[in-house]
Image: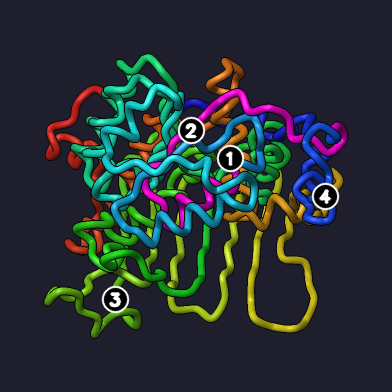
Amino acid sequence: MRACIGATIAMPREFRNKTRAVNAHFGYLPDEDRYVLSLGEPRHRFNVIGCGVNGQEHIRVTMLEGRATIHGVYDPNPRSVEGARREYAQFAPPEKLVIYDSLAAACNDPAADGLIISTPNYTHIAVLREAVKSGKHILLEKPMATTLPDAYEIMCMAERYGAVLQVGLQYRYKPIYVEAIHEALVRRSIGEIKTITILEHREPFLDKVKQWNKFSKYSGGTLVEKCCHYFDLFNLFAQSRPVSVYAVGSQAVNFRDFEYEGEKSDILDNAFVIVTYANGVRANFNLCMFAPMVYEEIVLCGSEGRLKAYENEDFLPTHRPHAGLEVMLGQDKPSRIATPCYPALIEMTGHHGGTYFEHVNFVDRIEGKPTNAATPEEGFWSVLVGVAAEESVKTGAPIHIEALLAQSGIKDV
């Protein structure tokens, strides 16, 4: 298992001026008079395929990061396209944005050198089959697929692909996880990691076009759709392969009476998941999707100490830090408490700034620089744990990874 080390992210040199460069107060300046406040000329041009909430977030961070620009977009939903226009217009004249009338046109336009795929989960495999014909660099949103065979096909596809194919597991770039990775895997502050706990309590899934995220056959199930982020982090911190997964869960509150085109919602809204790794590390995940806040927490217990990090968004007027990290090392070493964060401008772009730094790494990879971006192999293993967890909830039994792979006809992973 490849370590995600060296995870402290250096900001691009140009960033020192970006907070002011995009400030409306300086909008009066002609482009030729911008030097300190110049964003510079983009070196890459991306097309975005799928312009819902995530697609618009990708437009926003691409334009803000500045080394690339958005050339065009494709989405069959006109309102999504209008949303993309509005997002783009915050950074550039909207008439410059190309609107494609087909997937093939968006993938194969020679004016773009990269593609960002943020379509519904169940469409990823079909969109990617078209996208790879272009030979362009690709950023594929998570989860890379909704089934193991499709995820395996994408992983194999990536091994033969001549350009960058990066998977959008951007939680590893959230401030709390960047710092946790650095403390645990680079500094090795807490010694050998023995147990991993991640907790997410949050509101229900939001609305999507055609409500695809309310049905497991389209989303892959909650433990694939939402939780692949956390299983990616499990795999990173465990530095090993999972050997078994046991999970319990239910649809206790959310969407129990929800129907769309005559079909009833079937997604989980709570779960407990236990993962055992080949090296003896054990991980557990606690999910609740009917909580009146968004709260996320990781606890790592090692042979020499404990690390805890959290982020919180609630609806209270009381001011308190929205994130925290503590490394507790007892009497033998200094412990510390910190508030991991990025500049507000970056955190407000989405996912607490994780997507912004996902794009930093995407462009770095295109330019041949080393990164810790999520590979299709890592994307595959995050989906695998989610699929196993969904199956365990259905059967009530532990799922052995080797047997699940064999059942899916997958070998040599």
Q: Earlier in the sequence, mark 1 or mark 3?
A: 1
Neighbour tally class for label 3: few under 14, some 14-19, many 20 plus, Cα within 10 Å: some
Q: Is residue 40 left or right of residue 78?
A: right
**Which quarter of the picture shows residue 73?**
top left
**What number is the disc on residue 251?**
3
Mark 2 touching mark 3, by CB under 8 A? no
* Vertical placement of residue 124 versus 212, above or below: above
**What number is the disc on residue 101?**
none
Q: Earlier in the sequence, mark 1 or mark 2?
A: 2
Q: Earlier in the sequence, mark 4 or mark 3?
A: 4
**What number is the disc on residue 46?**
2
Residue at (18, 37) in percent of width and height: 149
Magenta-drawn stretch contains 246 = no
* Vertical placement of residue 210 versus 292, above or below: above
> 317 and 90: which one is in front?
90
Give the magenta range.
Answer: 35-61
* Vertical placement of residue 201 versus 156, above or below: below
Question: In whole angstroms, how far apart are the C-alphas of marks 1 and 3?
Answer: 37 Å
